Amino acid sequence: MATAWKAQVLGLAQLEGPEGQRVRLERRAAALLAYLGLEGPSPKSSVATLLWPDSPSATARGNMRQLLRRLRLASGGLELVEADSERLALGSSPRLDVALLRHAAVAQSHAEVLEAVRAGGGGVLLCGLDFDDCEELAGWLDGARAAVEGWVRNAREAELRRHLALCDWTAALTLAQDWVRQEPSSEQAGCHLIRLHHLRGDRSAALTAFERLRSTLAQDLGVTPMPDTLALVRQIEKGTSLPRPVPVAFPSLPVSVLRPPVLVGRAAAWRQLQDGLNSGQLLFISGEPGSGKSRLAEEFAASQGRWVRMEGRPEDPDIPFSSQARTFRVLLARRPDVKLADWVRAELSRIVPELGDARPLPPLASEAAELRFYEANVEAMGQLLAHERLVVADDVQYWDRASARVFVYALKRMLESGAGSSPRPCFIDCYRRGELPPYAEAYVRQLVDSGMARIIELGPLSPEEVRQLLAGLELPGAEAHADNLARYTGGNPLAIIETLKHLIETDSLHQEWPHRLPPPGRVGPLIQRRLARLSPLALQTAQLAALADSHFRAALAPEALEVPASAVHAALCELEAAQILVGERFSHDLVLEAVRASLPSAAARLLHGRLATVLERERAPASLLAHHWREAGREERALPHLLASAHAGEVLQLPVLGLEVRAS
């Protein structure tokens, strides 16, 4: 199958086919995959200029078309890169090792980072390839390699510490040995290996590991081990017992945090649900991820009597009738007493094979045949839902098109007929705002316009509602953080709960509010999904805003991003519609942190440099210019501004020079 292809740019750049065949990737093809895997969807013109910097734009575009064609031929017709007139993006397949690694690193899934490295062979990004003839691409590659190495190093350190905290010496030793094999001159890795051998009681192996490390440092780097390493070895030579790490006892989370006992800020939505139920309407609950759609629907359903839950899943859109088939399996398991007519079972066996027999059914080749199949769905749903008061369908944005079509048909038939002598259930469908596919949006609008349905929009909690939520948790210390939680999370209930979990697990609940927090728990990946749907320019605009922070102004973007003002205006409108920005500020701090996390270090340096250039022309404060030039890796450009800041009476740190500069 085509979907079994894998692409590798860590180590030797190559494609691996479903039958084990391997195809070497040419230099620019490998660079293209690596760039899209790390940077995400990108403007076609910008990528073409990176790959062919000395060619006219028309020639570069032609070269890009030929490159995409060669990639397609190399993979047996598979679209490795999806292209339209303006942008390039990785196709849905194959699996690209560096893209998997980046996704895991952003989500702080350290074990998945290391798995991606192992799957990719553990080599350097685009190993053996250089781009001396493409200066900007070469600069990008240097930064990308450093970013990948940093992600992997952080993951190794985190996993090692986790194994040490659990006293799992074997797993920790295996990881340390692998790290040393990959980075023989890493003193950090070598020290872990030395310590682990000693903790396992193998003094000889510990000293041998030290001698190997000392020799490698001398030969490769011309340096001697750090004092801490020498002190560790002296302890081992003396036979001193090293303190063993104490197993980590993570704080247990209170039940109230796992599921808050009070449903706060949803009284108006509850009344709308009740009104819709009384009116016999189909009810849609829409809101941002984490706004509490599922909780509201389920609590309301439970208050009304017997109810059943069904759901869509992310993989459903690729498999016709997968959502509807899962629904029938749930209902059949719930109602094993229901005897469906033979013709209904036969028709449903097209999507639920276990309902049929070995005889093949003819295809739905006519309107009459298709209508019979649809009517079988109506009949089965009517029987299986006869005793249900409510049906909650969660994540309907994932329902595949075929299931959505047959479900809407059955629903309309049930609404129009009144379900005969049996009372029909009320349906509550929950979906994430802005994520419905166009065909589903059309179905929803059609039902609402006809009066058969209503949409209930869930917004964020107000600061006062956040305080009510925290009071209901009865969690000592939590209410003191109410204002900060409201600001940091934007009033998103899931974000509030996940942030509280983070504060509890890091023993920070009774301390001052942290200076900076990453997107905690499930919230980071949810926001990352929203960022992934942005156009390349909108995402880059958000990243620029994240780096500029409180100094961001829309007027900076055209020059900094080298695009027309009209394009920036469209990008800002897109960011507001996606609730990333509100005006020139982020909708809440969690989004700001997630945008920062989405930015590879190489791209961050580039944007910092562009910001510094623009702000210099605007005569921005010297301290601000120094900050951006330093973050761009341009210490020589930062130094005059650092000195100017000092003369202005500011106290600044100069880590490169190891100095503190003060005004005289």
Image: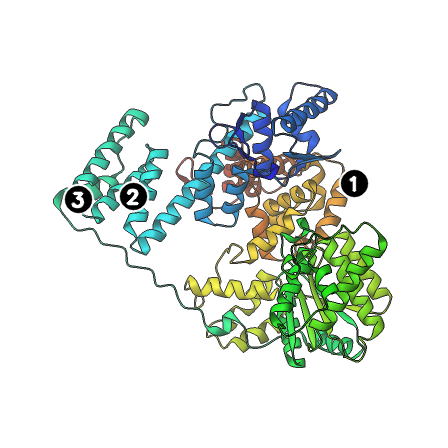
Instruction: Report if residue 109 is visible in the image.
Output: yes
SS class, disc 2: helix
Alpha-carbon span between mark 2 and mark 1: 54 Å
- In this view of the protein, which residue sits in the foreground, 248 or 491? 248
- In this view of the protein, which residue sits in the foreground, 481 or 247? 247
Q: Residues within 10 Å of mark 3 (few under 14, many from 20)?
A: many
Where residue 27 appears, x then y in whole percent?
A: 56, 23
- Whether residues under marks 2 and 1 lie with C-beta atoms below 8 angstroms apart, the answer is no
- In this view of the protein, which residue sits in the foreground, 216 or 451? 451
Residue linked to disc 2: 192
Q: What residue type is disc 2 on?
A: His
In the displayed structure, 624 sits above or below 182; it is below
Which label number is shown at residue 566? Answer: 1
- Whether residues under marks 3 and 2 lie with C-beta atoms below 8 angstroms apart, the answer is no
Closer to the chain start, of discs 3 and 1, is 3
Where residue 533 appears, x then y in whole percent?
A: 67, 47
Which label number is shown at residue 236? Answer: 3
Where residue 377 appears, x then y in whole percent?
A: 75, 64
Q: How many marks?
A: 3
Query: For the point 69% across and 40% down, which residue is it?
Result: 537
- Residue found at the very far right of the displayed protein: 450
Q: What residue type is disc 1 on?
A: Ser
Which marked residue is nearer to the observer: mark 3 or mark 1?
A: 3
- Whether residues under marks 3 and 1 lie with C-beta atoms below 8 angstroms apart, the answer is no
Which label number is shown at residue 483? Answer: none
Closer to the chain start, of discs 3 and 2, is 2
Q: Quadrant of residue 136?
A: top right
Q: What residue type is disc 3 on?
A: Ile
